[in-house]
Image (cartoon, rainbow, N blue to C red):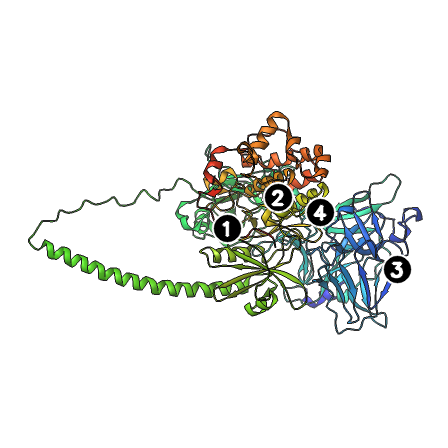
Amino acid sequence: MIAPWISSLFFSFFFIFSFNRRQFAIASSSLPPSERAPVYGIPTTANRSTSWINDESSLSSISFPDGSMYRAILRDETNSSICGFFCIQGASCTSYLFAILLNRHDPVVIWSANRDYPIRNGAILNLTAANELVLYDVDGSKVWATNTTGKSIAGMKLNDNGNLVLFDGDNSMVWQSFDHPTDCLVAGQKLFQGQKLIPSVSSTNWAAQKDSYSLQVTNKGLFAYVESNPPLVYYRHLVNGTDTDKQTRYVEFFNGNLSFFNFSTEPSLPKKFPLQYMKLMPNGHLTVFEYDSSVGSVGWMAVADLLTGDLGECFYPLACGRNGICSGNQECSCPRSSFPGMDSFRAVNDSEPNMGCSQVTPLTCNATQNHTFIEIKNVKYFTYTVDIENVDLGTCTQACLNNCSCKAALFEYGDPSHSNGNCYLPTELFTMTKVNVENAIVYIKIQNERSNTWANLSQPQPHDSVPKTKNQVKTVVGSIIGSFVLLLIVVIGFTKLRDKKKKTNTQMEEEFLDQVPGMPTRFSYEELKTATGKFSKKLGEGGFGSVFEGTLRDGSMIAVKCLESLVHVKKSFLAEVESIGSIHHVNLVQLRGFCAWRSQRLLVYEFMSNGSLDQWIYHGDRKHVLKWDSRKKIILDISKGLAYLHEECRQKIIHLDIKPQNILLDEHFNAKVSDFGLAKLMDRDQSQVRTRMRGTPGYLAPEWLGSVITEKVDVYSFGIVLLEILCGRKNFDKSLPEENWHLLRVFERCWEHGTLLSIVDRYSEDMQIHGTEVVEMMKVASWCLQTDFRKRPSMSVVIKVLTGVINVESNLDYKFSYTSQQKTTVKHGKTSLPLLPSILSGPR
């Protein structure tokens, strides 16, 4: 056995990934002059105490055919990379990254400072006199900083390899972007122990997809993980050494490969690299891209997929989503029972089978006696950790039944007789892969709907006859007195128990709030009282309280929502804190903090100067008439906010109260979804959830009558809001003739007669001018308003329609009114169902 110390003598621990490597001859500095984007006086260095404002008057905007644009701050000396403010939406930009771009004439983002927190027009980047590079949004809030205060910094430059560097008076590096990788490595960049690559959510959503994949280096080698609890390895490349080997290792990307080194064996690599970058993709692939500058070329091309050669498409953990089965050339299906008509899984999205499968009846720990299994033979899993060694199949499955967290029993026979083997009990189930082996089998746990829970209940017993006696009166009087005393004892005991429980719940709530991730500030009641001038300037009020305008000590304006003494206040408060306390999106109102003091419950939001959408679209209530372009942008903003809640959070968040009063507008009429007091959280593998009816009459989807809902209830509410925006009226308006009270009935009638132009907002001349385009948008509303929720699009599909990527589904049902529910939910403007009130309406 070779002693561990010998490993430090080796020059390098190379591992070559399985792909046919091409010889790249295009160095980043050798691009033809005709293909280089013009410099326009962009500097290569910047001195301390310099600021840059993200607007057209301060920085020149450079646009590209794909619709993206950037405002340059620095370039490198070879003009192969640039840093500045980047937006993928071009002229319609509402959010930007401070980013480094590779190849100025066909740019790709290789690093960004604020990937999770996009900034807006007017944001400021400041290389301060206090030796720190800081990014502020337009409202003055700090978004990102290098945290180099106390170090000596003379200036900033962008190196030829795309590395942004802060340097001191001796031109020595103090801080560099290479130490903070995002999802990419460029040629010559190293990935050290303790650093990781995390993919973005998508090509249009830069936020880190923290609940999917990651790539990182340890002292044992290179590992690719899928995020779970704990993270699971789906790719590994081990290097020589032992578990106690503490040498600092890293991988370096050059010439299309990753190679492994120790610090003690750091190689001498070429100074010029091919124009390449490596990216961890949202699907877990590690892809190498090369720029092809030949005539007629498409530009950036994927030239290598470094993990797939070893894994195969089906061995990526989410190749077919959670609970999915992958076979052949990534053909995805759901687990099926051997009993006809008893399928326990269905596709999350029938049109996208790689999105995974959800259980028809979710597992519950309250009914473990009804757990059973679906058997899938000849199946391999991307990882296998032996939980129980050398046991029979029955012992393995019983161990899973005994553990409610177990989602499946993966069993691999260890001997030819197929008697004993090894058992793995995962708590999350990702994609399984069909293979031509006979020694692997998986038992997936399901909830058996055919419960016998009630079968063994005792039958009522006949009462014994009570003979009459002469002491019957005494017995009755004694019973009454005894019952009274017993009742009194019960009442006193209940009161004490209630008070104790109330105190305990308050303590638990306090502890919960202190542990909510992402909550920026816990304000004191006195602090908010001062900020709001003793709650003197009311912005609006609604079902659960009032909202007041305030100003914090730093000068930033806030809106303080005071939840008042109603029975559902605590649930609303906790729901709102839990749902949006740890998320951030440009189209969601930011929850800046909260206050929980005695019986007071207050939520602190960013201030939205233009109030709620209802003030701008309802005739008679509106402040001014919005033009068509403004309405289109508001519609797209709402879509993006909802898509983020439904598809991009760790848990699905169903808002449950989408309406114009809960859509707020900032000074630039950017729309943001607010008021999460009724929100419902769902695990990503859940397809539906059962809950009592909640929301606002007129915006409720038909399936609410069955109390089993999906995120498509928000899609339906969005369809109503969309229709109100286009028509400039409320969905229920008694000021109109009776036949026009219900907007859906009018909408249905106009579809039948082909007179949709007649309901376009007649109080807006601009809307009338764009009437044809507005009518086309009504088709989107029609799709969202389908009575069968399965026919409604997801919000991400709505975004694709709004941006012109795809067309509206053509086979739609135009029967919208479902009169029976309208009669049930609204009667002369009053609610007749036991609905929870909407948290807050009115201006902010």
Category of crowding for the residue at label 3, using alpha-carbon neighbours closer than 10 angstroms: few (below 14), some (14–19), many (at least 20): some
Classify mark 3: helix, strand or loop. Answer: loop
The residue carrying mark 2 is: 620
Residue designated by label 4:
204
- How much space separates mark 2 and mark 1, taking CA atoms? 68 Å
Residue 494, label in figure? none
Q: CA distance from mark 3 to mark 2?
A: 54 Å
> Three-letter amino acid code at disc 3?
Pro
Q: What's the amino acid at mark 4?
A: Thr
Answer with mark 2 or mark 4, whichever residue precedes in sequence. Answer: 4
Q: Can residue 559 be seen from the camera position used here? A: yes
> In the image, which is nearer the foreground, mark 4 or mark 1?
4
Residue 743 image offset from top left, x and y in percent: 57, 36
User: Foreground mark, 3 or 1?
Assistant: 3
Q: Distance between the Cα atoms at labels 2 and 4? A: 38 Å
Query: Residue lying furthest right in this view?
Result: 33
**Pointer 4 local density, CA inside 10 Å: few below 14, some 14–19, many at least 20:** few
**How many angstroms separate mark 4 from mark 1 (CA)?**
41 Å
At 43% from the left edge and 42% from the top edge, which residue is drawn? Answer: 448
Mark seen at residue 423? 1
Amino acid on which the number 1 mark rests in the picture: Cys
Give me the disc on residue 43.
3
